[in-house]
Image (cartoon, grey):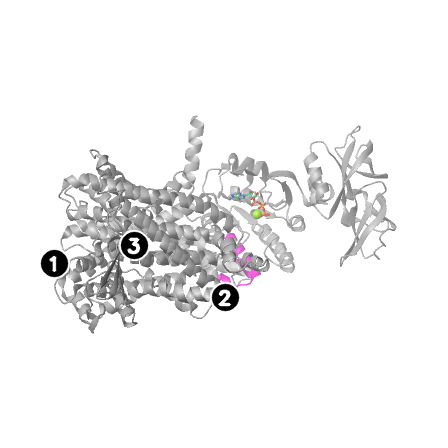
């Protein structure tokens, strides 16, 4: 087991900048998630760490060892691929035993360890099947078994569950965390599913466009995102452009149209004109359920029943766009009527626009 | 500066372990030594050459000699002799190749459009007949074409059939026109296959849209289909052009010497006459340029086109259209007869192989003796043994080098890979006679007296030439196989600690072995049916009267046809036909197996 240190790594493919000066540190035995939208460079980062790509700049350390220019076979970082990459011409047993054979272990030792991992992952009885004779969930386990059996110093998981259905994902992500902790392996877990990242990881790094935006524990990332992009990306959110009225330390008062609300302050200064407000829209309720809360009033544009929740789009007075909120089990209000939703204060965050103009524009357009 | 160098070395080390270094360097050295150097040494043969020689009327004659068509009346029968004119060696070759390309493209494209777009009774028969000439039978095919359509005093088969139908009309091809006919009939299926493949990659939506807009018939083809299959047409046409330029079979069979290929061929028959080296070298250089320049232009254009089409993903297959009355007329009265006429020689080869005699219009006397002769005449049998020996030596070399190149090009990222890629496919574009001539000049000079001297050991040189010329088929097949296999399968092995050699052995080879076998099978039949080097370098080890000559099957076939008296017997050409049927059977087997394996990607069998 090793710690991983990525220092100032950049990687371009032609004109595409896949990684832009990325630095991060993963502690020994930690399960570290990398979360970000499609194309932000997650796979590239894993491939650089595994040694499949050479960074244009920067260095990679496993513990104190500089592995930047080591070949994959010299590094000991084992990757579990998004499509699992099981060898179709080998039986399950041989797929799993491969890494042990490469290491030249004696036959009975190989057999012992393969049986142990088959047992660990509930694959007993499948050892003589070929990969195409397995279900998706079984294939995923074989891929994991193939990596775990060599007890790698670093385990890299690239969206290991993305090809599975929702129920299986839920089950397997718990198993992965359990195994990783039991075996004490340092692991990086790449996903674009924020819920998965928050559920499984000790710490999470949020990535966007080749950069690390923020690193923190799942709780920090969810409840108190320091960066606008994190706030927007995690959970179901709504974004509004607002006028700054007053700044009182951790709290900021802003106006959306003519609607005055307060929000948790992230870097908004006295004298700033504009701020971006991010609502954790799934925290909205039809009654105030907290001591410290925020009221959002507006005309109902649409209200849609969506199974477990109701989407209500409100247009606040004097504001030219509408905001979506998700409320559990209410009677959908009539379009055109006035309606008020309530959110806890820690579900409303205000960020300074300075330096993030492009992102703000993008977020407002996307909505 | 130093730090930068160190970094470059570190990065290079990542790609270049001992295995990948060998996989890269060995084929590179091989191709530089046995492809680039021989071709380059053609220039040394030109050191004292007086280029004005080529301006003489023998080479370029702007006042063509003779009438292209001669019509005679004999005993109330109209005799039409199609001869072509003599414009000098160089112009003859160029004009002939252009004509063959034109006719082959017209016929091949028409047949492909009919078979690929329309449904009508007899479509499958047409498809099979059209691919028959792909089973090449060097020399014999042209010989049978001469029997069927050539001018001879005994009359030919087609005239005989016209006469039996009561038409008092005889037609016969000879000279340059004979070559044009023979090559057109033999090569048009290459265009056919390429266009058919291009049609297969068109998405049905495009055609359906045009139909919905009311586009029908010829208009539909001209405005929608042709632009889409243009890459296929161009690929096929270029290949036909090069094959026609380098073909020495038809000129030999029609005994017409005034084309470039025959003139280069003559150099080998009289190689002691050093005075001829200059001319032969100049003609080789000219042939090389005439082949390579158009190919380079077309490929540049094609690669752009192909990317535009590939972007759309897998096509939805086309539902065939109903053929209208005009189309029916064209199909049955024009296309069918031409396709039958082109398939007839292949069937003729079979008939000749089982005939006692076929000199005039019709064969006579069924016999199996021709096959007996194959094994009983030592000089003839020797050809079979030689071919098998050469295949057995060349194919393992092709397997190793071809895999090395395909793997390197597909998977190793260092500078110069593009050059290796180019070098390995370039032999497809270089006329075989140019390769033969280059080998002779180069090896006879630098390796004089050794086993690499073609005058000392033609067999060694032949095998090397076969490897270089026929390896591209294996390279392409394996390369396609490798890039269609996700690289992650290899990466999964390497991150588990497997070094490159182990990854290749345990992952790559087991996953692409089908492509390797398919490629080697193709290389095998193309080695067996190779002509240019076989009849030139192969001839240096003596004629077929000698039971220890070094010529392969194609050389023996040529000698049996070109100079039947050397071996004697009833009709040596029929023995040649028997030999050719063995090649044909082998080709049928391999093309069938390979095509089945490559699932409809027939165009890769032959396209450049
Ligand atoms: N081999 C390559 N050649 C060219 N561009 C590449 C290559 N690999 C990645 N890219 C580009 O680099 C960027 C980052 O790609 P990457 O695969 O790392 O994204 P990702 O975050 O893993 O996305 P996803 O969630 O869709 O898997 C993308 O714009 C991608 O198109
Ligand atoms: Mg990815």
Measured as percent of width and height from the top left, residue B594 is found at 37, 61
Q: Secondary structure at mark 2?
A: loop
Say above or below: B186 vs A2. below
Read off the magenta span: A130-147
Residue where numbered disc 3 is placed: B180
Measured as percent of width and height from the top left, residue A18 is found at 56, 40
Q: Secondary structure at mark 3?
A: helix
Measured as percent of width and height from the top left, residue B130 is found at 37, 63
Does the rendering let one see residue B41?
no
Instruction: Considering the whole magenta stretch, tell me its main secondary structure.
Output: helix
Q: Earlier in the sequence, mark 3 or mark 1?
A: 3
Of tags 3 and 1, the one toward the viewer is: 3
Q: Secondary structure at mark 1?
A: loop
Queried whether the magenta region covers residue A136, the answer comes back as yes
Q: Given contact means CB atoms under 8 Å apart, are the residues at marks 1 and 2 in contact? A: no
Residue where numbered disc 1 is placed: B545
Residue where numbered disc 2 is placed: B324
Q: Given contact means CB atoms under 8 Å apart, are the residues at marks 3 and 1 in contact? A: no
């Amino acid at each position: 087991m090793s710690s991983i240190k990525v220092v100032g790594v950049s990687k371009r493919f032609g004109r595409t900048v896949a990684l832009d000066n990325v630095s991060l540190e993963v502690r020994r035995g930690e399960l570290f998630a990398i979360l970000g939208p499609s194309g932000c460079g997650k796979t590239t980062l894993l491939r650089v760490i595994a040694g499949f790509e050479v960074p244009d700049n920067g260095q990679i350390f496993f513990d104190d060892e500089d592995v930047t220019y080591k070949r994959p076979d010299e590094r000991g970082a084992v990757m579990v691929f998004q499509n699992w990459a099981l060898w179709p011409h080998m039986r399950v047993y041989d797929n799993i035993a491969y890494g042990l054979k490469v290491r030249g272990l004696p036959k009975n030792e190989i057999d012992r360890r393969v049986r142990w991992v088959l047992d660990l992952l509930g694959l007993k009885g499948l050892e003589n099947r070929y990969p195409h004779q397995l279900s998706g969930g079984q294939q995923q386990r074989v891929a994991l078994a193939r990596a775990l059996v060599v007890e790698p110093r670093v385990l890299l998981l690239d969206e290991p569950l993305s090809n599975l259905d929702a129920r299986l994902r839920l089950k397997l992500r718990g198993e992965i965390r359990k195994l990783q902790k039991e075996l004490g392996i340092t692991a990086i877990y790449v996903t674009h599913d924020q819920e998965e990242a928050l559920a499984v990881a000790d710490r999470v790094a949020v990535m966007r466009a080749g950069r690390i935006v923020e690193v923190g524990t799942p709780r920090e990332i969810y409840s108190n995102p320091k960066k606008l992009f994190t706030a927007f990306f995690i959970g179901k959110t709504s974004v509004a452009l607002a006028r700054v009225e007053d700044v009182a330390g951790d709290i900021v008062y802003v106006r959306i149209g003519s609607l005055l609300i307060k929000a948790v302050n992230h870097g908004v200064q006295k004298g700033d004109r504009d701020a971006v407000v991010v609502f954790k829209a799934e925290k909205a309720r039809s009654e105030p359920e907290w001591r410290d809360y925020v009221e959002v009033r507006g005309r109902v544009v649409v209200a849609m029943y969506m199974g477990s929740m109701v989407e209500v789009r409100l247009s606040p007075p004097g504001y030219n766009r509408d905001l979506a909120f998700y409320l559990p089990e209410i009677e959908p209000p009539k379009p055109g009527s006035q309606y008020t939703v309530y959110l806890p204060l820690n579900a409303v965050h205000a960020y300074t626009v300075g330096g993030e103009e492009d992102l703000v524009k993008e977020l407002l357009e996307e909505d | 500066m130093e730090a930068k160098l160190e970094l470059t070395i570190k990065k290079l080390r990542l790609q270049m372990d001992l295995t990948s270094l060998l996989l890269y360097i060995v084929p590179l050295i091989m191709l530089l030594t046995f492809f680039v150097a021989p071709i380059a040494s053609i220039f040394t043969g030109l050191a004292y050459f007086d280029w004005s020689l080529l301006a003489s009327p023998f080479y370029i004659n702007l006042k063509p000699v003779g009438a292209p068509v001669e019509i005679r009346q004999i005993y109330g029968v109209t005799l039409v002799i199609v001869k072509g004119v003599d414009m000098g060696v160089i112009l003859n070759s160029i004009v002939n190749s252009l004509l063959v390309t034109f006719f082959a493209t017209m016929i091949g494209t028409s047949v492909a459009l009919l078979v690929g777009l329309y449904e009508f009774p007899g479509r499958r028969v047409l498809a099979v007949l059209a691919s028959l000439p792909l089973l090449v039978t060097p020399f014999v095919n042209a010989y049978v074409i001469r029997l069927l359509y050539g001018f001879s005093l005994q009359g030919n088969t087609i005239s005989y059939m016209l006469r039996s139908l009561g038409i008092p009309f005889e037609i016969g091809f000879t000279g340059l026109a004979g070559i044009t006919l023979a090559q057109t009939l033999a090569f048009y299926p290459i265009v056919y296959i390429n266009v058919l493949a291009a049609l297969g990659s068109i998405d049905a939506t495009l055609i359906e849209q045009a139909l919905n807009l009311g586009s029908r018939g010829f208009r539909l083809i001209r405005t929608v289909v042709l632009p889409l299959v243009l890459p296929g047409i161009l690929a096929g046409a270029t290949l036909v052009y090069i094959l026609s330029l380098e073909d020495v079979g038809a000129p030999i069979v029609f005994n017409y010497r005034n084309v470039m290929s025959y003139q280069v061929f003559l150099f080998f028959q009289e190689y002691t006459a050093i005075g001829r080296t200059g001319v032969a070298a100049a003609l080789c250089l000219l042939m090389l340029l005439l082949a390579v320049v158009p190919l380079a232009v077309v490929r540049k254009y094609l690669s752009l086109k192909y990317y535009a089409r590939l972007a759309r993903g897998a096509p939805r297959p086309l539902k065939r259209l109903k053929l209208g009355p005009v189309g029916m007329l064209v199909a049955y009265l024009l296309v069918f007869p031409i396709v039958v006429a082109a398939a007839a020689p292949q069937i003729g080869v079979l008939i000749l192989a089982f005939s006692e005699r076929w000199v005039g219009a019709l064969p006579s006397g069924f016999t199996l003796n021709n096959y007996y002769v194959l094994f009983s005449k030592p000089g003839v049998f020797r050809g079979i043994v030689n071919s098998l020996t050469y295949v057995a030596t060349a194919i393992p070399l092709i397997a190793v080098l071809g895999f090395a190149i395909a793997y390197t090009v597909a998977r190793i990222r260092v500078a110069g890979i593009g050059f290796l890629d180019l070098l390995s496919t370039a032999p497809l574009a270089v006329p075989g006679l140019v390769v033969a001539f280059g080998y002779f000049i180069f090896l006879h000079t630098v390796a004089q007296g050794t086993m690499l001297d073609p005058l000392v050991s033609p067999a060694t040189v032949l095998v090397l030439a076969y490897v270089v010329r026929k390896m591209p088929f294996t390279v392409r097949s394996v390369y396609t196989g490798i890039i269609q296999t996700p690289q992650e399968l290899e990466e999964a092995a390497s991150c588990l600690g497997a070094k490159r050699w182990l990854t290749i052995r345990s992952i790559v080879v087991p996953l692409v072995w089908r492509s390797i076998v398919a490629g080697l099978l193709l290389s095998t039949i193309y080695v067996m049916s190779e002509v240019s080097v076989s009849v030139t370098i192969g001839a240096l080890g003596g004629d077929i009267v000698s039971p220890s000559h070094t010529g392969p099957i194609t050389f023996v076939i040529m000698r049996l046809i070109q100079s039947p008296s050397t071996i004697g017997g009833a009709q040596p050409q029929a023995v040649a036909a028997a030999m050719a049927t063995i090649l044909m059977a082998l080709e049928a087997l391999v093309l069938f197996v390979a095509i089945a394996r490559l699932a409809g990607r027939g165009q890769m069998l032959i396209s450049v």
